[in-house]
């Protein structure tokens, strides 16, 4: 709740304290959504300030497995490790991960494992914390989180989960030996440029191969995470059972996160559309069992996200149950029966079986446009 000057900027907000005239008569009741008629009434009675709340977002609680401080700490640690490799390359020194940096990555791993252990009842959602130029570092942390959740759901032993997560945290370290103008290029890569970028799994393996503290399983993930079941992947063109299952876990998590986070050259894809792409890939290119397991750990429509219902109404997800995250509670604006006032309605899609979510909209982008 905040006190706000009465102007067109408060359109679409909700009155959270009743508004009275100078004679003590109630003008606007609590809960009213401000439209043009309400605004005109406030102005005609010389009301200067009202207490409002965003009508749809309100006090929606965003659930996050990894609290922002821990996430930011993890991303900064990975950035330090990766940047150190890049610095060695610029000096013409053969890059290698020193012991203290391996320990730093292991500390990140333990932080993630401990935090995820305390968040069993929350489904994972990707959180954009840093600018797009930090994508590589943030992406490695996101993929590690998804890989931990997927490996746990597949009943991997804790020591194997640690090794899988370590490989995921370092899976793109080879990109530090690729020209950064290609990694950060805002447009499409040429064929030659793409071939240069596709060297990063082998380059990452070269960086980690001689580091005894990094287990073999993690090194295999770094080298093989772009291999596909039909042999269309790289760098070795492996097929089917030639690719270890623990590598396949990171491959699917890598693809999912790459699609659902902002990149320099494109915006993020809605979660449900990324799921459709992965489902198509699961026919020939990725392991369908791992795809199904990953999808069970992800919140498709997280609280605070904008959705469009099948009847055309636009709303914001207010809550969901782990048992049925694809049919959340949604807040929508309806035209009221009195004086054309807008009213907030909360719909539980678990109970409204004829309604479904047909599309999404970007709440953050809309908010930025409204402020301009």
Image: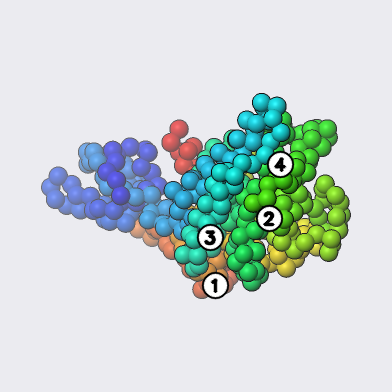
Which label number is shown at residue 323? 1
Q: Considering depth in this image, is 296 or 48 the residue closer to the camera?
A: 296
Q: Is residue 4 visible?
A: yes
Q: Is residue 190 above or below residue 220?
A: above
Query: Which of marks 2 and 3 precedes in the sequence?
Result: 3
Disc 1 versus disc 4: distance between alpha carbons?
43 Å
Q: Secondary structure at mark 2?
A: loop
Query: Which of marks 1 and 2 precedes in the sequence?
Result: 2
Give the residue at x 64% y 36%. 85
Which label number is shown at residue 364? none
Give the residue at x 82% y 48%. 234
- Rendering quarter of residue 190: top right
Which residue matches tag 2? Answer: 215
How far across and how far down the image is residue 115, in percent?
48, 59
Q: Considering depth in this image, is 30 or 263 the residue closer to the camera?
A: 263
Disc 4 versus disc 3: distance between alpha carbons?
25 Å
**Side of 125 where 93 appears, left or right:** right
Which residue matches tag 3? Answer: 113
Query: Which of marks 4 and 1 precedes in the sequence?
Result: 4
């Amino acid at each position: 709740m905040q006190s706000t000057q009465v102007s067109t900027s408060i359109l679409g907000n909700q009155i959270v304290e009743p508004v009275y005239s100078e004679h003590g008569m109630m003008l606007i009741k609590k809960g009213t959504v401000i439209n043009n008629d309400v605004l005109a009434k406030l102005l005609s009675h010389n009301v200067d300030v009202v207490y409002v709340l965003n009508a749809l977002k309100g006090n929606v609680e965003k659930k996050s497995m990894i609290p922002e401080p821990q996430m930011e700490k993890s991303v900064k640690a990975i950035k330090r490790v990766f940047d150190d490799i890049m610095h060695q390359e610029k000096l013409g020194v053969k890059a290698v991960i020193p012991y203290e940096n391996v320990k730093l990555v292991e500390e990140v791993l333990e932080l993630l494992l401990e935090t995820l252990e305390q968040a069993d009842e929350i489904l994972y959602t990707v959180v954009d914390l840093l600018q797009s130029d930090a994508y590589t570092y943030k992406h490695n942390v996101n993929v590690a989180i998804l890989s931990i959740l997927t490996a746990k759901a597949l009943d991997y032993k804790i020591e194997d989960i640690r090794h899988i997560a370590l490989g995921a945290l370092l899976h793109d370290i080879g990109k530090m030996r690729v020209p950064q103008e290609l990694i950060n290029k805002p447009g499409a890569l040429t064929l030659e440029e793409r071939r240069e970028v596709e060297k990063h799994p082998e380059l990452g393996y070269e960086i980690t191969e001689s580091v005894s503290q990094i287990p073999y399983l993690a090194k295999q993930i770094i080298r093989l995470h772009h291999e596909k079941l039909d042999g269309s992947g790289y760098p070795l063109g492996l097929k089917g059972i030639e690719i270890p299952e623990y590598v396949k876990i990171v491959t699917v998590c890598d693809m999912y996160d790459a699609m659902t986070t902002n990149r320099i050259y494109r915006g993020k894809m809605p979660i449900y559309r990324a799921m459709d792409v992965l489902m198509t890939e699961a026919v020939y290119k990725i392991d369908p069992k791992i795809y199904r397991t990953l999808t069970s750990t992800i919140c498709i429509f997280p609280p605070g996200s904008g959705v469009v219902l099948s009847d055309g109404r636009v709303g914001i997800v207010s809550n969901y149950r782990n048992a049925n995250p694809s049919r959340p509670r949604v807040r929508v604006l309806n035209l009221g029966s009195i004086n054309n006032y807008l009213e907030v309605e909360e719909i539980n899609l678990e109970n409204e079986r004829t309604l479904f979510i047909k599309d999404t909209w970007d709440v953050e982008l809309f908010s930025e446009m409204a402020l301009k």
